[in-house]
Image (tube, helix red, strand yellow):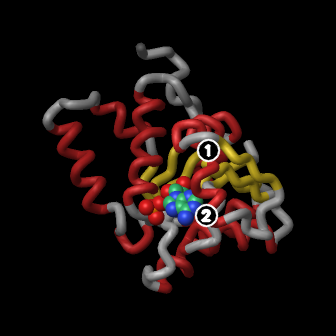
Amino acid sequence: MNKICIFCSASDEIDETYFTAANNIILKFIELEYDLVYGGSNLGLMGFTAKIFHENKRKVTSIIPEKIFKAVGNPDFVEDCFVVNSMHERKLKMREMSDCFMALPGGFGTFEELLEVITLKQLGYIDQPIVIANINGYFDDLVVAFERIFTEKFAKPEFRDLYLVSANPQHIVRYVSEYEPFNKNGFL
Ligand code: AMP
């Protein structure tokens, strides 16, 4: 396992504490020689994340739809850039290339990407570890919404294990390193 796909904010306006905490988590993955797959922006936590991987001599791969690529180009810390036709194609390529997924705090784009991989894992299409990096408790409300899904039986209780929610860098890398396939018994 050595490619992590990170979904995160493309906003430069967020609080500095998000960058500091994200840095601590990212460095743990770099210690384990992970390379990065991400959406190709130089903005916000996205650009910040890619720069850290690049500065630490890890490979940065961006997967970016043509429409966005035409508007923003390719940041110089990206080593390998795939320009694709659509957001759908981007997410498919990200999944094919990545050994694990992590959402750092972000907006609609991040939520959409995170929920898609959780849904696909629930249906047995993918089986990589998924981490929700709950920096500053940013995802607390989402976790409460997820809990209602389980308590009202919209999803099986074992699907709580589709993902890890943690802000602790050691905990996160241990989860990914020791990950056991979720769908090993083929539940569908
Ligand atoms: P958001 O969480 O709404 O800031 O969106 C972040 C997610 O959407 C990222 O993981 C990207 O895949 C995608 N995204 C949003 N803005 C951009 C951008 N300017 N360039 C490339 N990808 C972007």
**Residue 84 visible in rendering:** yes
Residue 51 lies left or right of residue 180; in this view the side is right
User: In percent of the image, x 56 and y 31: which residue is there?
Assistant: 127
Q: Residues within 10 Å of mark 1 (few under 14, many from 20)?
A: many
* Marks 2 and 1 in Cβ contact (< 8 Å): no
Is residue 179 at all visible to an observer of this figure? no
Task: Write down the quadrant of residue 144 in the picture.
Answer: bottom left
For marks 2 and 1 on the same chain, the one whose residue lies earlier in the sequence: 2
Say which element carries label 1. Answer: strand
Residue 147 picture location, percent across and down = 23, 46
Name the spot of residue 14 as percent of width and height, x first. 44, 80
Instruction: Please give the count of numbered marks on the rendered protein.
Output: 2
Left or right: 51, with 138 as reference point? right
Residue picked out by circle 1? 100
Residue holding disc 2: 71
Res. 157 mark = none
The yes-or-no answer for disc 2 within 8 Å of ligand 1 is yes
| Quadrant location of the N terminus in the rendered image | top right
Q: Please provide percent x and percent y for residue 8.
A: 51, 62
Callout 2, which amino acid?
Ala
